[in-house]
Each structure stands twice: as C-alpha cells, then as structure tokens.
Image (cartoon, rainbow, N blue to C red):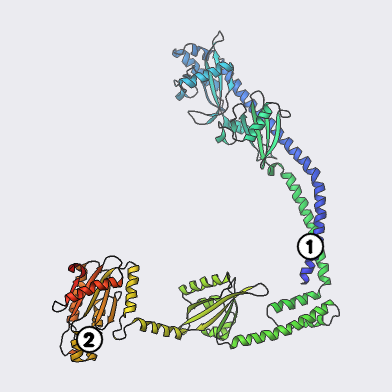
Amino acid sequence: MRKNIGNKIALLIGLVEIIAMTILFLVMNQNLTRILEAKAIHDMNVIACDRAQIVETYIADCVDFLNGYAKATENREVLEHPDDPAYIKASRDYTDLYAEGYTDIEGLYVAKWDTYVLSHTNPDSVDQTFRDAESAKALEDMIRLNDRPFCTGIVQAPVTKDMVIPVYAPIKNLSGEPIGFAGAAFYSDMLVDKLNAVSDEEMPGVGYSLINVATGVYIFDNDPSLAGTECTDQDLLSYAVSLQSGGGDDNSLSYSSGNDIMCCYYMADRDWVFVVRDTKNDIFGVINTVRIWLIIICLVITAVMVIICMISVNRQMKPMTTINSAIERLKANDFSKDPLIDECCKRKDEFGTISNAVQELYSALENQYELFYEMLESQSVGTLVLSAEEENIVMINRMALELFGLSDESREGLRISDIRARFDEEENAHIKENLDEIRNSNTEITFEERVNRDDGTKIVLLARAKGIILSNNDRVIIVSLTDITEQKKLEESLKILSETDSLTSICNRRSGEYRIGENMKNGLLGMFCLFDVDKFKYVNDNYGHATGDALLIGIARTMQKTFRTSDTLIRLGGDEFVVFATGIQDTALGSRVLDRFMGNIAAMDIPELQGHKITISLGAVIATEPENFSSMYEKADSLMYDVKKKTGNAYIFFSEKT
C-alpha cells in the first residue's frame, strides 16, 4: 500500500517533468530538424549531380575512344576492300594495338552494315554476323541518323553475357559517305567501380539508377538485373518527365517515396535522369541521434526527480511498511504475531487506526481459518484444491492423502507431480482433459480414475471437480474424492451375471445377440451356427434333470474347447445353442471347423449317462455381408430340422439347402 501511494506521487511528478521536457524538446528540435533535413537533401542533390557528371564523363570517354578508332585509315580501307586479306590483317593488327592496355573494353570491332565483323579484339567474333537482316538494317538507320559516335545504354553482351555499354560510330569514305561502322562495348562494372569509389562516407547506403526518359527503360542500376528493363515506378517516371519539361531547379528535384528519399538529376544532353536514393533512416540519421539524446536527457532528469520523490515519500510513510507486511502475511495465511505492528497500534494518528484494524482482522481470520481447517480434516471425503493455472496444490486433507496412499508427513512439500505419478499414462491424459474443461467453465464435472498405491493395491476414485473464482480473482479447482472400489467390483460382478448363462457360464441370449450385432457393425463377418441336442427330452425323462444339466454343461465346455475365445458362444435356452465364428467366409473352412466340433461332441463322456452317447443337429449360415441375428437364426433353424432326418452328429450349410 505504502509503495503504491509513493509510486503514484512520484509518477505524478514524473508526468509533469515529461510534459516540461517534451515542450523543451519540441522547441529545440523544430529548428534543428529543419536545418539538418535541408542540408541532407542538399547533399543528396550534390551527390546526384556529381555522379551524373561521372556517368557523362565516362560515356564521353568511351565515345571519344571509339571516335578515334573509327577515323583510322586501316578501318576505312578494310570496309572499302572487305575481301582483301592484306587490308583485313592491317585492320585487325590496328584493332589489337588500339585496344592494348585498355582494361575497360569488352570488345572493339569493325563491321559491315549487315553486321558481318571484319576485325575484332576477340578472334572468336571475327567473320561472324551478329544480327539478322531486319535488326541489322535498324542499327544501320540509327547509325546513319546519328552520324556521329553515340552510346545506346547498357545491354548484355551476346558472346560474354557481361553487362556492357555499347558505343557505335559510322566509318566514312573519303567522300564523307558512311560505308560501315565501328563498335565497342565497355564493361559497366568499370562505371560501377568509379561510382562506388566516390561513395560519400556520410551516406554509405546510397543507391542510384540511370533512366532513359524517352523510353522509360533503366539504362543502369546498381541492381544489374534492372538494366534494360522497363521502370514500373510511376512516381519516378512522373518526376523524370517533369524534369524533362523543365519542372526542377537546376535540373534536379527531390521527393519522398515510402521510407526512401529520391533525388533526380536530369542529363539534358542525353535525355537521361540520374536518380540517387537512400532511406530516411540513413539520411536523417543525425537528426534521429539528436532526438534520441534529447529524449535520454529528459528521461534521466525525470527518473532522478521520481527517485528523489520516492525516497522522500517513503521516509514519511515508513510505518506503512509494517502494515503492508502484515497484510501480505494475511494473504499467505500466515497468522504469526509481529511486534512491530503492536508498536504501530500505539500511534495516535491514522497509521495507529489502520494498525488496530489489521490486528482485529488478524484475530478474526485466524479463528475462521482454524475452524475451516478442522472441518476439512474431519471430512470422510478426500478434498484436493489446485490453482487453476499452474495446478499447484493449494490444500489437501488427510482423507485425500490416505486415498492416494500417502502419509500425513508427506503433506509438507507435496507436489502435483507426486500425485500424478500414481496414475497410469492413459489415466493422466484423461485427468488433464477434464481439468482443461473445468478451467474454461463453472460446471461441475464427475469422472472416475484408478490410483496405484505404494502397497501394490489399485483403487477406483470417483472425482467431482469444479472451478471457482476467489475474491482475489484467483481461480482454483476443488476436487472431492470418494473410494468406489467395492462399488465398481459389485457393478462388474452384476454385469457378468447379467450377461452370462447361469448354468453353462457362456453368453446368454441378450448379451450374445448384442456381441454378434457389434461384430456386424464393425465388419467382422463369419459363420453363424444353430444346434440343439437330439432327443434331449429322452435324457431328462430317463436320467433326470440333473443329468440333463450336466450334459448341457459338457456341451458348453466342448464349445469352448473347439472354438476361439474371440468367437461368440451362446446358450439360447433349454438345449439350444448358437456359435458365431468370425473370419470364416466359406464352407470349406467352415466344414473343417464343424467336423472338429462334431468329433469333440462324439468324444464327450458324461458319467451320469452311463455310456449313452448323444448327437446334435446343426444348421450353419455363412454371413458374407452384415445381417441381423433374427435373419440368420431363421435360416439356420430351417436347416437344423432338416439335419434331424440324418443319423448321428450332422450339419448343413444354408447354401447347400438352397
């Protein structure tokens, strides 16, 4: 409580400080930001202009280089005498000599108008025609139209596949008529190196592009994959056209695009726009740094003021420390006496009044807690209280410990994992599922679980669990536990008695029909057999009903001996029995099983019959698709009476009769 009041006062002062520092920050930041932003934009415009000049100078050097080459006598003569080996050799020697030591060049050559190469720095490219007739004519028209050396931009070299700057120049005869052309390709990487060599240290992340305004195509970009592709940035194209029409100051303008700042410089002689771009974070990095430092200073001043305030308030409200500690112990159900609270009770101010109220609350809660604890311990039902979120044990009574097979001494330090260890993995999964459901509802849930105790016994517990929210908003789960082991044993015994024929201990009619129906639902088809004892009335009349019962018991034992435990054995009543053997899908397999059964019946020896042998008559139905009990019974019953016309143990399959 004391800390909360002190913190509130300190935070109020801190809020005032933040408002004051915010006003100071805004005043200082306004002019500083404007100056720094203007300087950053100016620097970018200078960079754009300087780098455009580098591009212009580089291309001009390339054009001048080719211009000198195109004016060579050797190149004019080879075009005038393209079939003369002497002129060809002279031109090729001159080409190699002219290009010697010039590392920027990818290729230098002389070609006829149809682009047939007469001389080239790359021997593999001579005597080759590198364009078809249509594109060669277009190139000729473009060279004739320019009538001087010119650059067409940046393209991918057809042989080396490198990005190059192609330059073309007409080669004229002595009359001034163009008779062919000279071409050169300069590595664009060299221009990249020149641009990167002058990268501004204050703007290391700057990027740049060169765009042909007339076509809207990238001539150059520091992303090589964009060279020669159409620019899709409509804002950039719009500003480029604006510069083309004189819309900028000193051929340059700047604009913002998302998180980037773009500076464009128009190269009027070539109708190109050089674009420099950088992120706002890089450009205004200094501004952001200044802002951060101003914020840090404000926060430090505010924190110092809050700390001073907290120290002062805490010193004045020191008695609340004792009162607050007493309340915290109450929340933890700790009712031990504290002499410091007694001292506070003697005060004549508000602290004394609060201390006396806390003491009275101590006494009342301590009495209620002791009463509740005794009531919980005296219950004949196990009670377990868990925290809903972490499932920690909040409380457990003596009966719950006994049900889990734990001693009263183990209560101290007992964890939920100690209790979970007494359940099987499947049981634990079931418990977790139920507890998860309780967390999200206030409905009481009842479930059964089996506990493995240290003495080797296993008991069944009936658990009733419900989640509740306490007054402090903590959510707990209360679980009541009852031992229902004997009840479950009784229920199991009653279930067995209800499903078993009391004389033969095999299935009675009700449970047998149910099991056969479940087999059919699950696709477990097989052989249905119905049989009774021939002349059973004779046995009862001449040997007595006790002997008849012994005979029925013997037949049930013979059925269990012959058939599998997974098969369904039923006594319908009197001397009538049913067998359903799963998996038997044809009469051949069925006959082998029934022959064995008939042999076992013939071998039966009932002492009370004094050597008298009995026989049975059996009707069998092969169920190849799901069929109800009544339908199979009717088919087998009609067969059984036909079998009685035969002598001895006999059977007939339904398919044989039909």
Percent x, y of residue 169: 56, 18
Q: Is residue 73 above or below residue 605?
A: above
Judged left or right of residue 328, residue 537 is: left
Judged from this view, the residue extending furthest toward the right is: 348
**With respect to residue 15, does 338 lie above or below?**
below
Residue 630 vs 286, above or below: the answer is below
State the quadrant of the C terminus: bottom left
Q: Is residue 641 above or below residue 13?
A: below
Q: Quadrant of the N terminus?
A: bottom right
Q: Residue at x 76, y 54 (%)?
A: 296
Mark drawn on residue 11: 1
Q: Which mark is residue 627?
A: none
Q: Earlier in the sequence, mark 1 or mark 2?
A: 1
- Depth check, front residue: 484 or 289: 484
Label 2 Cα neighbours within 10 Å, binned few <14 / some 14-19 / many ≥20? many
- Camera-nearest residue between 223 and 523: 523
Q: Position of residue 455 (x, y in %)?
A: 46, 85
* Residue 551 marker: 2
Residue 340 seen in render: no
Amino acid residing under circle 2 = Leu
- Mark 1–mark 2 Cα distance, whole angstroms, equals 97 Å
- Residue 205 image position (x, y, % from top left): 65, 40
The residue under label 1 is which amino acid type?
Leu
